[in-house]
């Protein structure tokens, strides 16, 4: 599937730039909350890494109540896949 978008604030020439498809490793997920920020929080996996036989995900997620975007490595076992 090919997508395009016009660049906002660009050269003003109306060029369209292709948007590459989302890599299969990038998935939306739910991140559990903690005592200071009850969850779950909506997130997206940015990268996967295997460490000592266990999988970890670099996740960017939003704590909506505080309007804070967090990026951190989490054990894959802590995440719930969306979709």
Image (tube, helix red, strand yellow):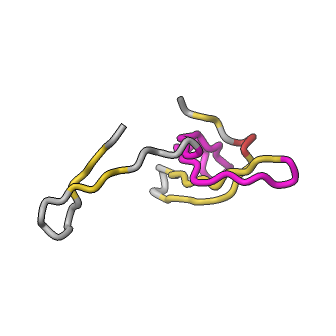
**Extreme-top residue of the structure:** 83
Who's the residue at 20% across and 68% down the image? 10
* Quadrant placement of the N terminus: top left
How many labels, in total? 0
Comparing 67 with 48, the one in front is 48
Q: Which residue lies furthest to the left in this view?
A: 13
Judge whether residue 59 is colored magenta: no
Could you tell me which residue is drawn at 76 percent across and 47 percent down? Answer: 55
- Name the residue at 49% across, 59% down: 68
Q: What x and y, as percent, mark residue 61?
A: 54, 51
The furthest residue to the right: 52
Q: Nearer the viewer, residue 8 or 67?
A: 8
Q: Is residue 11 above or below residue 33?
A: below
Tell me the magenta residue range: 25-53
Q: Where is residue 49 in the image (x, y as percent from the top left)?
A: 72, 54
Q: Residue 45, image x and y in percent? A: 58, 48
Write the residue at 86% across / 48% down: 53
Confirm whether the magenta stretch covers residue 45. Answer: yes
Which percent across, then down, holds residue 21?
A: 43, 44
Left or right: where does residue 55 sit relative to residue 17? Answer: right
């Amino acid at each position: 599937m090919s997508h395009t978008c016009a660049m906002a604030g660009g050269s003003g020439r109306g060029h369209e730039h292709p948007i590459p498809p989302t890599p299969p490793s990038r998935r939306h997920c739910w991140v559990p909350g903690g005592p200071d920020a009850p969850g779950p929080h909506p997130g997206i996996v940015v990268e996967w890494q295997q460490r000592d036989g266990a999988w970890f995900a670099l996740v960017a997620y939003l704590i909506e109540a505080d309007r804070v975007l967090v990026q951190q490595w989490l054990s894959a076992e802590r995440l719930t896949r969306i979709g």
